[in-house]
Image (spheres, grey):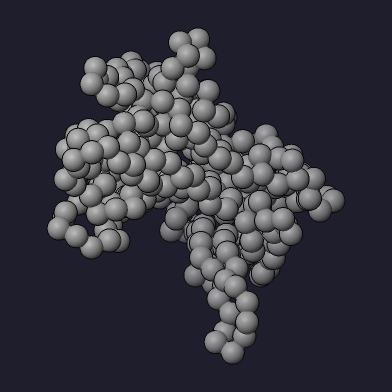
Amino acid sequence: ALSETMGYVGVYEGFLVPADTEEGTPIPVIADITFTSEEMFTILTLGYLDDTDGFDVLHFGIRTQHIKDISRAYTAIITEKQETIKQNMEDFNGMVNPTSARLNATIEHIGGTSRSIDGYTVSRLSLFHAYELENGSTMPIYVKLNSNCEDVKTYIKNGMESGATFINLYPDTLYASINGRSNEFTVDGENYAPKSQTKYANISLDIVYYNLLKKKFDTKSLSFPISKVICTLSKTVSGTNPGKNIINWEIWENTGWGKGALDGDQKTETGFTVYANYSYRGNVSEAQVETFSVSGAIRYVYILMVGDDTLDYHIKTQNMTFNSSVRILP
């Protein structure tokens, strides 16, 4: 709510599902709605940013002067907030890698994946963890998400209708998960980050990357503004181990992380990292391989100027998934 007398701006995300009598697959949809108690204007974005057939944008309602004033006020809030975010992204000390003489417990860059459309990379995922884990011990699994604002901006600009001016673009929502595939390979208690929160706050997170100079895994601690985090743990397989083998995150910054804060790849000190310590609680008499997967996606907010009016849009990438494994030692 911008104010009780002015109005509201909302972003709603879901799927359009075919009726029972119709064939077809669900269509992802994001609704950008500007409204008051008497007026409403809605922008529907159908499809993902990286759909090969492109995505569709539909407009519903009348852009009254009151609705335009609300949009301008919201754009002003985003612009002002981005300057604050830029000033508050402070550096902190890094952390020390866990090591072991008995097994290869050094954290490594394992690999990653990305989503692209027409030659433009719209999101990247990088995975870091150790190759080996001792039965009963714990191992951190790091999932790093990177945006690519310049490529996304160029791709959207290439498909814009004439008469519109591109104002700005930022990532504003992150989705990430780690999926252990057995009942024995589970999240170790509360050893994960970030944790759920419902109020705006600046949190300190270790951003992981492959240090080209040191030729190894490294971290950099940064302060991130967060509007809301929903972190859920679940168990999808049966067994006596009470631990949860899947962890999911949805992370919001309502006005977006700007100024290239999340742009980069596995080699940069930028991006956003989630992590969870996993442990193996089975009875291992000889070495075995445990497989798991990680995934992630990014949602962007972008602002267009049409005439003297500003319009705010949201668009999401498809999910990135990467499979990996760790060697469990007795």
The correct choice, above or below, for 24 with respect to 161 in the image is below
The correct choice, above or below, for 91 with respect to 113 in the image is above
The correct choice, above or below, for 150 with respect to 41 in the image is above
Q: Residue furthest front?
A: 286
- Closest to the observer: 242 or 203? 242
The correct choice, above or below, for 91 with respect to 307 in the image is above
Residue 92 visible in image: yes
Counting from the top left corner in percent of width and height, residue 26 is at: 57, 71
- Closest to the observer: 17 or 79? 17
Q: Residue furthest right?
A: 162
* Image quadrant where residue 208 sits: top left
Residue drawn at the location 40% of the way across and 19% of the way down: 218
Counting from the top left corner in percent of width and height, residue 50 is at: 66, 51
Counting from the top left corner in percent of width and height, residue 162 is at: 85, 51
- Closest to the observer: 295 or 274? 295
Left or right of 248 in this view: 69: right
Q: Residue furthest top?
A: 213
- Closest to the observer: 82 or 126? 126
Left or right of 131 in this view: 1: right
Residue drawn at the location 63% of the way across and 36% of the way down: 149
Residue drawn at the location 33% of the way across and 44% of the way down: 290
Residue 69 visible in image: no
Residue drawn at the location 53% of the way across and 48% of the way down: 320
Counting from the top left corner in percent of width and height, residue 314 is at: 59, 53
Q: Quadrant of the C terminus?
A: top left
Q: Quadrant of the N terminus?
A: bottom left
* Image quadrant where residue 166 sits: top right
